[in-house]
């Protein structure tokens, strides 16, 4: 085991370990298990500069994460079980609540209830049966919560598996058949964070062959608590010596968040002008709101290429807003305003091979006096008759107006095309309302999506962000067919609710890491190696912010598990660890905070002025 500060020191330690593993055989395989994808990319590019300082390049290097390696080893053994997606897990929870909700009777049908229970389920999956027994009587909710959790787990185990199942199965396979690791060669666990019990069990199984752990520390006892707990779970002895905590080399402050971002963007531009490569500059924020969107907007306005997590989830994209709006028309009776709002979101087909002429159709419907519901066809027919009368009047006039006749004919054509579209759309939506099984609704919704917005081949002509959104919609809608395993009947409104939740949680990336300035949360600092880092939003109310106790997994229940569930305080310690890792990521680190919030007319305090806050 090697203990090292984060940043360049950790990468140097990794290079030494890999170099020693390849001393006798440069082509020998070495597997490096990283905490996240970005840390893996940084490590691979650093090692590609050479292991001995004289020659570039490295061969036989495989970078992965513990869950991904577990999937590679154990997924064939778990066949024919399939991965349990978030939609599948939520469906299992709805089925369990329908069967016996217990104390959740009054709120069992609320989407937020299922979402909260599914989140608690993911944490409880790592808790042993003995710890669950100890926690069963800790709160008034815990008996029903744990009973339902165990019921959902057994329901899913028949045909599905999750990350915990993969990790435990992989650990068992490796212990039983050590030869499975021959292709991985030497294994290095690089700067692990707070490993779950399942992850630690798999890592211990890997250690039976040969496992080198490179542990990153900050020099602050509380911040390193999770890393020390991970080392204990791995059977390693945590070191007593402490490194010196890193600090920022410069501190900036501004009147509010907007001014702070503008100031930092000027500093970034100055750093690039001084010769710093853009891919070795990062701006890390303490809170996504409002910093993520502000940074992307201002850096883009400055003409800088950026990469990192996107600021808009899939449900905010035009094609997603349009499709969800079309589905919701089924329950609202096609009101005119909502119909044209949905049609205007993205280029839409008329369900008959043509293109929807939104502006022309909207004018015709407004002139006809359409409100919605049963108004559409009668009022459009009256409008067509009125415009036909205008044409007849012009035809019998001594001085007919050709332009007025042509305008009336265009209005008639628009009204007829709109009436045909509304008729077809209403029929399709009524068909969706009549379907009551997940496979039927899934097939219907996917067909409607393609008829409205184009075939999969045609969707590739959209902008990249919209292509990603369309792909997520297609994949999600197709996956809903599997919910029939837990829910024999459903409805269109339930499909819309599930689809909204899935699209809200789908957050794409902007750009490719290494192309332009990286913009991301402070938690992304683990494994970064930069020339200049800017950490924004370090106001006390935003970072670390307030601790909010989980209503389902409160502190009493967590304490009853005796360390198997992380404590509320651990989240605060993790934020401090990530901040100190950000300070270690570059020789030049600028920390900034806003002095106030002009929107709320309040004063704000910097995080660093209240050490006791941590």
Image (tube, helix red, strand yellow):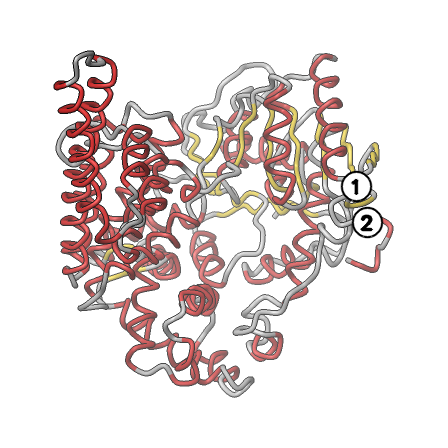
Mark 2 or mark 1, earlier in chain: 1
Few, some or many residues within 10 Å of mark 1 (<14, 14–19, 20+): many
Q: Position of residue 74 (x, y in %)?
A: 30, 53
Per the image, label 1 sits on a secondary structure element best described as strand
Front residue of this view, candidates 535 and 487: 487
Q: Position of residue 279 (x, y in %)?
A: 59, 22
Q: Which residue is drawn at the image coordinates 23% and 27% (left, top)?
A: 411
Residue 180 in view of the camera: no
Q: Is residue 394 left or right of residue 287?
A: left
Residue 313 in view of the camera: yes
Q: Is residue 55 left or right of residue 277?
A: left
Circle 2 sits on which residue? Answer: 604
**Label ID, residue 8:** none
Circle 1 sits on which residue? Answer: 594
Q: Position of residue 273 (x, y in %)?
A: 72, 12
Q: Position of residue 248 (x, y in %)?
A: 80, 37
Front residue of this view, candidates 560 and 338: 338
Front residue of this view, candidates 396 and 414: 396
Q: Is residue 28 left or right of residue 270?
A: left
């Amino acid at each position: 085991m090697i203990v090292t500060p984060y940043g360049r020191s950790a990468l140097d330690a990794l290079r030494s370990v890999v170099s020693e593993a390849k001393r006798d055989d440069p082509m020998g395989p070495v597997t490096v298990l990283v905490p996240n994808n970005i840390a893996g990319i940084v490590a691979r590019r650093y090692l590609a500069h050479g292991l001995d300082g004289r020659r570039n390049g490295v061969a036989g290097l495989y970078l992965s994460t513990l869950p991904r390696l577990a999937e590679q080893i154990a997924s064939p053994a778990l066949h024919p079980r399939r991965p349990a997606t978030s939609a599948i897990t939520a469906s299992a929870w709805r089925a369990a609540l329908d069967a016996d909700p217990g104390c959740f009777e009054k709120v069992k049908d609320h989407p937020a209830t299922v979402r909260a229970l599914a989140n608690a389920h993911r944490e409880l999956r790592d808790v042993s049966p003995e710890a669950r027994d100890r926690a069963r009587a800790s709160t008034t909710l815990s008996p029903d919560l744990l009973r339902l959790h165990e019921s959902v787990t057994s329901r899913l185990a028949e045909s599905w598996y999750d990350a915990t199942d993969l990790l435990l199965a992989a650990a068992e396979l490796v212990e039983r058949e050590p030869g499975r690791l021959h292709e991985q060669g030497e294994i290095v666990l690089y700067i692990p964070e707070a490993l779950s019990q399942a992850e630690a069990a798999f890592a211990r199984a890997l250690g039976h062959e040969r496992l080198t752990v490179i542990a990153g520390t900050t020099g602050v006892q509380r911040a390193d608590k999770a890393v020390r707990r991970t080392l204990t779970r791995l059977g390693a002895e945590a070191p007593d010596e402490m490194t010196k905590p890193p600090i920022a080399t410069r501190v900036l402050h501004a009147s509010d968040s907007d001014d702070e971002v503008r100031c930092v963007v000027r500093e970034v531009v100055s750093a690039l002008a001084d010769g710093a490569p853009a891919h070795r500059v990062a701006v890390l924020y303490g809170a996504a709101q409002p910093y993520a969107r502000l940074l992307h907007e201002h850096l883009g306005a400055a003409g800088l290429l950026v990469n990192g997590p996107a600021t808009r989830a899939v449900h905010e994209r035009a094609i997603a807003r349009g499709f969800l709006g079309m589905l919701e028309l089924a329950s609202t009776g096609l009101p005119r305003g909502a119909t044209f709002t949905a049609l205007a979101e993205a280029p839409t087909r008329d369900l008959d091979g043509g293109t929807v002429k939104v502006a022309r159709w909207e004018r015709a419907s407004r002139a006809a006096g359409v409100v919605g519901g049963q108004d559409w066809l009668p009022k459009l027919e009256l409008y067509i008759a009125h415009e036909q009368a205008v044409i007849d009047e012009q035809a019998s006039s001594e001085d007919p107006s050709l332009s007025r006749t042509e305008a009336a004919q265009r209005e008639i054509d628009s009204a007829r095309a709109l009436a045909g579209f509304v008729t077809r759309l209403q029929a399709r939506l009524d068909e969706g309302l009549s379907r009551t099984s997940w496979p039927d609704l899934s097939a219907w919704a996917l067909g409607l999506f393609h008829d409205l917005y184009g075939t999969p081949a045609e969707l590739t002509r959209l902008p990249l962000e919209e292509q990603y959104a369309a792909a997520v919609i297609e994949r999600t809608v197709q996956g809903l067919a599997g919910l029939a395993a837990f829910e024999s009947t459903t409805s269109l409104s339930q499909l819309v609710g599930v689809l909204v939740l899935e699209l809200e949680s789908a957050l794409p990336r902007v750009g490719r890491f290494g192309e332009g300035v990286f913009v991301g949360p402070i938690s992304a600092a683990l494994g970064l190696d930069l020339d200049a880092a800017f950490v924004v939003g370090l106001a006390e109310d935003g970072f670390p912010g307030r601790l909010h106790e989980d209503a389902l997994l409160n502190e009493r229940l967590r304490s009853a598990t005796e360390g198997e569930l992380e404590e509320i305080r651990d989240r605060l310690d993790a934020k401090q660890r990530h901040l100190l890792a950000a300070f270690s990521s570059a020789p030049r680190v600028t920390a900034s905070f806003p002095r106030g919030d002009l929107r709320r007319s309040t004063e704000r305090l910097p995080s660093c002025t209240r050490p006791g806050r941590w």
